[in-house]
Amino acid sequence: MTPGNELIFLALGGSGEIGMNVNLYGTQGKWVMVDCGITFADPFYPGVDVILPDLQFIEERADDLLGIVLTHGHEDHIGALPYLAGDLGVPLFATPFTAGLIRGKLEEEGISDQVELNVIDREGSFDLGPFGFRYVPLAHSIPEGNALLIDTPHGRIFHTGDWKLDDAPLLGEPATAKQLSAIGDEGVLALVCDSTNVFNEHASGSEGDVRKGLDEVVQAATGRVLVTTFASNAARLQTLGEVATDTGRRLCVAGRSLNRILAVAKASGYLRDFPDVVDFDTAMSLPRDQVLIVATGGQGEPRAALSRVAEGSHPIKLEAGDTVVFSSKQIPGNEVAIGRIQNALAARDVQMVTDRQAYVHVSGHPGRPELAEMYKWIRPDILVPVHGELRHLTEQARFGIECGVPGAVVQSNGEIIRLAPQEPKRIGHAPVGRLVLDGDVILPADGGTINERRKLSVNGQMSVAVAVRSQGGLAGTPQVRFSGVPVEEERDAFLNEVVDAVASAVSDGGAPDDRLRESVRLAARRTATRWTGKKPVVDVLIVEV
């Protein structure tokens, strides 16, 4: 698939799911990529934390890929770069704050000298082959959230990235209604738009209003207060710095990613008035009503600071009468993990406040009133919903048409859409999928390793070692070990029965070969199934003597 005299859109991630955003635009034989993110694993991927997009389609066409343009610095938009950008071998383009985050990631992976990273001024523009790009600042929950205005031979694209409307943003100056209307006046072929909060009937709200809600909660607290939020939400960090000052508390930061965001934000010219922070020992020595702690882990991440605080294994200690404020939205799928932490805090008699009890969080994504405003300003010919599950994409397409957008395209990962010339049309399908970062190795998400691990996690594992004579028959007692098979009090009786079953299989199986190995495997597994109802993975070692 090589784009000709046409304009192609193809999502390799982020359409049909929330996270792992990767979008391609193609024309006149060339491609550009917008964003390259990750998503985080769930229990379906045991032992895995990070999931990457499978970029096979564009890797096979890397000679025609001109570059990767990043809208902003959230992990679901830049997180895959340290693992995949080096193989693509193309330059990266980002505004200063986002570039600072990316640079740190590349340095951690030891590939900063292998990947070209171009820093583009805020509201800057540049060209890549037949594409022209201009950054258009929009409000979001991280500094330098940007839309991309993309000029192509077949019309202009307004690619929103993640965004919201905010009348009182704390960091940065988003484009005004007048500026966005001026873009619409020049004509826009397609609006490629964030769908995350399309079911929200209300606007997301202003970060400025969150300060008032947090002030009230922290002012009313009599003990230590810990606020957990997304590390990347630098605007919320600014808010919490102001809340600490408002309430006469010293600020303490717990979490490596929070410290990294603070450093990059300050280096990029943000958080200039952020108060000095105290270390853990100082925080613990202060009177309990004079400390405000900001910590990572509000989504239940087991290794994050809040989880360790809740378990009592962190230098920061909480006890009865202290307060934990969850200043973030609960991401679907994290309910169990968050509940585990909240139960651990409840066991310590720690009070908890979420956005259900107080105004302590606003979303970084647009609700329906904000979407309607964007449609009115940009006035696209075509709406292409992205950044959402299929239900979000379908609903935004319906809502956009209801608001007067002439047409909409509901697409999902892998669907190749010709946006121009003529009416938008599906013209093919690209291979898409997921990869997992397993330790330091990248593997197929549904490959042999992960499938084996799933089987092990469900059924357990047995190892059987048998010594046999070359003419056939046992040369000793079979040795059996098992792990994760649900046998406890009757362990010895179970092992004896497995040994007997294996010995019988060897006696009936003849010379040592693959058929004998399979007979031994089945004999052991059938015994385990009869005892437990499970079918463990059975590894067999046959030694000929």
Image: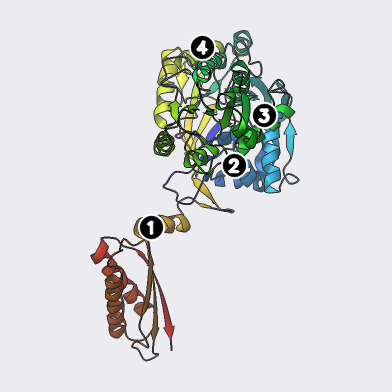
Identify the mark nearer the N-term, 4 or 2: 2
Q: Is residue 344 left or right of residue 82?
A: left
* Amino acid residing under circle 1: Lys
List the single residue furthest toward the right: 113
* Dot 1 and dot 4 residues touching (CB under 8 Å): no
* Dot 1 and dot 3 residues touching (CB under 8 Å): no
| Nearer to us: label 3 or label 4 | 3
Identify the mark nearer the N-term, 3 or 4: 3
Q: Which residue occupies 27% across, 70% down?
A: 527
Above or below 267: residue 536: below
Name the residue beneath numbered marker 2: 80
Rendered image coloring scheme:
rainbow
Residue 484 at x, y percent in the picture: 37, 61
Identify the mark nearer the N-term, 2 or 1: 2
**Real-space Cα separation, disc 2 to disc 1, in angstroms:** 28 Å
Identify the mark nearer the N-term, 2 or 3: 2
Name the residue beneath numbered marker 3: 277
* Amino acid residing under circle 3: Val
* Amino acid residing under circle 4: Glu
Locate residue 305: give its quadrant: top right
Name the residue beneath numbered marker 1: 455
